Image: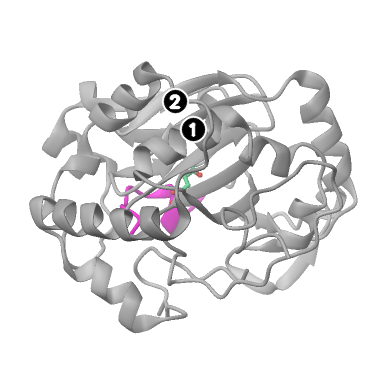
């Protein structure tokens, strides 16, 4: 999977412009709702449902109402350590300069965000199993309304850099598909100084502008009020589900660096990306439809 930039300002070119912009152009929430109902029915007719456990009604209701729900500890300490060790000598790529590649022991001081390859993520212990766990697939099936597709898998470092900020560290909305959400899981402890995720409650239900835009902290607190902001801090292993069609950002770390896993579930592939699925050598039986974009 090659990552294209979804936030404005980087001359982003989607893998399939027609399908990508088609879903972006329909910004009216009721009209999008009608499209989603028709499209999910089409997927249901072709794929059936996964026959898994029903999602917890509380998780589904909170995600639907707020756009954010805490999922508690999704990985234990030992699993987080296994993941950390797996990536310790793997190469990551600077998100803002693909020519710069390094390991965690040799991060250039000016690096703000850096990401591991899909191949290394699929080969990592616990990640594919978590993405295919009953809890997450049941929530995804309920929220998407049909068998979901895993349309993005990422593991990203955020480093404390005194000046500037990246697009992901400024308030924005994503526009990945007709309907989707992300599960974000911290792989290091994240307090206020480690760049926690910040989400504006309820904004996934509001109309998105036609042109994606970045917004300052002052604009966002002026528009929504500080009490609408959810700041997700938690120990390593803590995860939450978030509908990133709503306004959000990863705060810039001011003290500690942050490692985070990101799993995206959607109705269709994200037409922003070119997918190159990678071999999975683990023992879990995977649903080939749900995993088709990431696992060869
Ligand atoms: O790093 C974060 O917490 C936010 C990530 C983000 O903005 C995104 O994936 O669109």
Q: Residues within 10 Å of mark 1 (few under 14, many from 20)?
A: many
Q: Quadrant of residue 97?
A: bottom right
For label 2, the SS is: loop
- In reply to whether residue 167 is colored magenta, the answer given is yes
**Residue 158 drawn at (x, y percent):** 61, 45
Please give the name of the residue rendered at 83% of the width and 47% of the height, measured from the top-left corner: 87
Q: Residues within 10 Å of mark 2 (few under 14, many from 20)?
A: some
| Tag 1 and tag 2, C-beta contact below 8 Å | yes
* Residue 267: assigned label: none
| Stretch of the chain drawn in magenta | 163-175
On the picture, is 205 further left or further right than 230? left
Q: Nearer the viewer, residue 95 or 218?
A: 95
Total numbered circles? 2
**Residue 48 drawn at (x, y percent):** 45, 50
Residue ID for mark 1: 138
Whether residue 62 is visible, yes or no, is yes
The CA distance from mark 1 to mark 2 is 5 Å
Whether residue 195 is visible, yes or no, is no
**Residue 219 drawn at (x, y percent):** 18, 44
Q: How is the image coloured?
A: one colour
Residue ID for mark 2: 55
Please give the name of the residue rendered at 88% of the width and 38% of the height, measured from the top-left corner: 85
For label 1, the SS is: helix
Q: Nearer the viewer, residue 229 or 263?
A: 263
The quarter of the picture where the N terminus appears is: bottom right
The quarter of the picture where the C terminus appears is: bottom right
Please give the name of the residue rendered at 22% of the width and 33% of the height, measured from the top-left corner: 202
Q: Nearer the viewer, residue 109 or 267?
A: 267
**Residue 78 drawn at (x, y percent):** 83, 22
Q: Name the N-terminal-most of marks 1 and 2.
A: 2
Magenta stretch: dominant secondary structure: loop
């Amino acid at each position: 999977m090659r990552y294209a930039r979804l936030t404005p300002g980087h001359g982003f070119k989607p893998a399939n412009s027609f399908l990508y912009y088609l879903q972006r152009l329909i910004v009216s929430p009721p009209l999008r709702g009608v499209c989603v109902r028709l499209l999910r029915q089409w997927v249901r007719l072709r794929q059936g449902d996964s026959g898994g456990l029903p999602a917890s009604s509380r998780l589904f209701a909170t995600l639907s109402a707020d756009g954010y729900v805490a999922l508690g500890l999704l990985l234990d300490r030992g699993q987080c350590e296994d993941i950390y060790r797996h990536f310790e000598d793997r190469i990551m790529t600077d998100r803002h300069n693909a020519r710069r590649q390094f390991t965690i022991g040799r991060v250039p001081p000016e690096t703000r965000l850096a990401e591991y390859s899909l191949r290394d993520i699929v080969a990592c212990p616990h990640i594919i199993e978590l993405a295919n766990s009953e809890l997450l697939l049941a929530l995804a099936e309920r929220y998407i309304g049909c068998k979901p597709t895993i349309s993005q898998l990422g593991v990203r470092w955020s480093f404390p850099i005194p000046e500037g900020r990246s697009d992901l560290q400024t308030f924005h909305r994503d526009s990945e598909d007709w309907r989707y959400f992300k599960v974000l899981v911290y792989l290091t402890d994240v307090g206020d100084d480690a760049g926690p995720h910040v989400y504006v409650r309820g904004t996934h239900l509001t109309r998105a502008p036609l042109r994606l835009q970045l917004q300052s902290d002052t604009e966002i607190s002026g528009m929504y009020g500080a009490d609408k902001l959810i700041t997700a801090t938690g120990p390593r292993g803590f995860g939450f589900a978030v509908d990133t069609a709503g306004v959000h950002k990863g705060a810039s770390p001011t003290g500690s660096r942050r490692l985070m896993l990101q799993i995206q579930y959607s109705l269709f592939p994200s037409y922003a990306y070119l997918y190159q699925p990678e071999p999975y050598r683990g023992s879990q039986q995977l649903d080939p439809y749900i995993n088709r974009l990431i696992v060869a």
